[in-house]
Amino acid sequence: MSDETQKRIQELVESSPVFLFMKGNPDFPQCGFSAQVTQVLRSYGVPFESTDVLADPAIRDGIKAFSNWPTIPQLYVKGEFIGGCDIAMEMHQNGELGSVLEAATEGS
């Protein structure tokens, strides 16, 4: 990954307390996993930003190297990588995700 791509990804991750790298956008997800994570985030009512990795091949490939995680979507909270769909769903089901999101978005 180029330094420029790494810098762009870092800026995106830091641009919002909750940031999702996904296929498509929250209103029109382009894969079921991205749709699941979007739906879960919306269920908490927290604001989040996202980017469509399908629109930018450098980001699509770069985010996998950046996080050392092979799949998309990828969820970041307060600049920290949380995980993909499976981890986000597991955290949602055990109640952990709500606490993480609430702490990250207090005062937003």
Image (tube, helix red, strand yellow):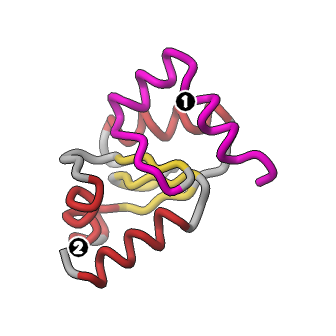
Q: Secondary structure at mark 2?
A: helix
User: Which residue appears farthest toward the bottom when viewing the image?
Assistant: 4
> The N terminus is located in which quarter?
bottom left
Quarter of the rendering containing residue 65: bottom left
Q: Residues within 10 Å of mark 2 (few under 14, many from 20)?
A: some
Q: Residues under labels 1 and 2: Cα distance?
A: 29 Å
Q: Which residue is pictured at 36% across the width and 47% down the height?
A: 74
Label 1 amino acid? Leu
Quadrant (top left/top right/bottom left/bottom right) for the C terminus: bottom right
Could you say which is closer to the camera, residue 28 or residue 100? Answer: 100
The range drawn in magenta is: 79-108
Q: Earlier in the sequence, mark 1 or mark 2?
A: 2
Residue at (30% x, 84% y) in the render: 4
User: Which amino acid type is shown beneath numbered disc 2?
Assistant: Ala
Magenta residue check for 50: no
Where does label 1 land, which residue? 97
The residue carrying mark 2 is 58
- Residue 13 location (% of width, % of height): 47, 62
Q: Which label sits in the foreground, 1 or 2?
A: 1
